[in-house]
Image (tube, helix red, strand yellow):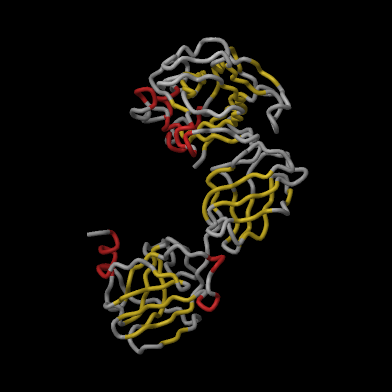
């Protein structure tokens, strides 16, 4: 049996929410209250529901449910989860920005004997940020945040208490663009206030946050050798001080993995990837991040990222493989790259991930890191020019 079927066998006395307004249009089903599908230590009574949440509808006449809608949006129902006095259902995804306002905050249950409308708050969860397009953007830059419930925003505050005044959400709440406000130079999380609540972009994404920095080529500079240049160049619009430039204009033959040739690698000295106190954390909680600026369309080859030349575990950074028309270029902007540490895998990045942080980087979390430009394809790289900055390992969940 599923967990919800097992749950139904254990359901007990109905909980009543007398404050909620009820309408009975069919004389058949009745809803008297809502509960969470998994009991908390204290109280399972709900005062509002969110999309994707499983809930229990308590009442009567629910054994022949045909449909359930939240704010006019139909939920997927499973009649196996129905009983006369209760019904388990998952709240559907709801387009809050384009709802029929006459159906807002309503739950309608229809059975073979009629329908019943129950008035109850249906709200989005607080904004949830998964990524920021450029975590080291400057005031005046427009950045894109991706995630869930990034709509119905009332305010956005950057670290240091700097409020943003220009932002726009996508209709489905999956993305939001915001102009970085003047004075936003402090590192930390971005705070969001919406009708669904308050949240931070951390831990998934910070703004100008140097936590876990391995090398920024400025204040934290563990660079050893390899890159064509460590420069501060206005030709890479929006850079933050010095960065490493991987530039190779003489061509790289198909199948050429001689990464040690001039200008084809970034090799850092030993550096603390993860604090010793956190080495017992799950490897799934961490990711490597850096900013990249690719000036010339990238269509072949990749950058192998290898801890300390061991080649046991490797992450293959080749964003062109999933880009439109298999071509990657930054269009004049730096972009934050997120590589989960589970992407460091055996078999040249195509095998199995390390089972723990210590397996990947040693018991003390102290290791070197090497980024290597290779042509592992069947066509040559005729030209390559990219900047890489702010190499860091951070806890993202």
What is the x, y in percent for residue 267?
55, 16
Residue plotted at (25% across, 68% down)? 80
Residue plotted at (54% across, 16% down)? 265
Q: Is residue 9 left or right of residue 74?
A: left
Does any portion of residue 369 appear in the rendered image? no
Please tell me which residue lies in front, 30 or 72.
Answer: 72
Residue plotted at (41% across, 73% down)? 69
Q: Is residue 288 left or right of residue 198?
A: left
Q: Is residue 27 left or right of residue 336?
A: left
Hey, which residue is sitting farthest left in the picture?
1
What is the x, y in percent for residue 67?
34, 74
Hey, which residue is sitting farthest top in the picture?
261
What is the x, y in percent for residue 183?
77, 43
Q: Quadrant of residue 75?
A: bottom left
**Quadrant occupied by the N terminus:** bottom left
Please tell me which residue lies in front, 108 or 171.
Answer: 171
- When the figure is inspected, residue 49 is found, relative to residue 218, above or below; the finding is below
Please tell me which residue lies in front, 380 or 360.
Answer: 380
- When the figure is inspected, residue 260 is found, relative to residue 336, above or below; the finding is above
What is the x, y in percent for residue 325?
48, 37
């Amino acid at each position: 049996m599923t967990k919800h079927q097992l749950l139904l066998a254990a359901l007990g006395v109905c909980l009543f929410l007398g404050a909620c307004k009820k309408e009975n249009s069919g004389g058949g089903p009745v809803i008297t209250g809502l509960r969470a599908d998994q009991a908390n230590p204290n109280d399972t009574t709900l005062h509002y529901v969110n999309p994707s949440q499983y809930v229990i509808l308590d009442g009567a006449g629910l054994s022949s449910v045909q449909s359930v809608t939240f704010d006019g949006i139909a939920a997927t129902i499973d009649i196996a989860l129905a009983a006369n006095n209760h019904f388990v259902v998952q709240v559907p995804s709801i387009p809050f920005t384009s709802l029929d306002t006459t159906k807002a905050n309503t739950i309608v249950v229809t059975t073979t004997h009629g329908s019943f409308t129950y008035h109850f708050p249906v709200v989005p969860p607080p904004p949830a940020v998964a990524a920021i397009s450029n975590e080291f953007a400057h005031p005046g830059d427009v950045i894109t945040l991706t995630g869930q419930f990034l709509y119905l925003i009332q305010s956005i505050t950057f670290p240091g208490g700097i409020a943003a005044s220009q932002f726009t959400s996508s209709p489905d709440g999956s993305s939001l663009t915001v102009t970085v406000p003047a004075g936003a130079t402090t590192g930390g999380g971005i705070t969001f206030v919406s009708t669904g609540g308050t949240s931070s972009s951390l831990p998934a994404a910070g703004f100008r946050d140097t936590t876990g920095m391995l090398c920024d080529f400025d204040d934290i500079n563990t660079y050893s050798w390899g890159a064509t240049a460590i420069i501060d160049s206005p030709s890479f619009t929006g850079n933050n001080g010095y960065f490493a430039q991987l530039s190779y204009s003489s061509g790289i033959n198909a199948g050429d993995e001689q990464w040690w040739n001039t200008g084809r690698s970034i090799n850092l000295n030993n550096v603390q990837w993860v604090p010793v106190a956190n080495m017992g954390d799950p490897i799934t909680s961490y990711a490597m991040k850096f900013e990249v600026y690719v000036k010339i369309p990238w269509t072949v080859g990749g950058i192998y990222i290898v801890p300390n030349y061991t080649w046991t575990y490797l992450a293959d950074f080749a964003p062109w493989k999933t880009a439109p028309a298999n071509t990657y270029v930054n269009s004049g902007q730096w972009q934050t790259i997120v590589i989960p540490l589970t992407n460091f895998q055996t078999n040249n990045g195509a095998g199995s991930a390390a089972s723990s942080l210590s397996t990947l980087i040693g018991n003390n979390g102290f290791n070197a890191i090497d980024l290597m430009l290779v042509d592992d394809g069947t066509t040559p790289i005729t030209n390559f020019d990219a900047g890489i900055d702010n190499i860091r390992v951070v806890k993202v969940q």
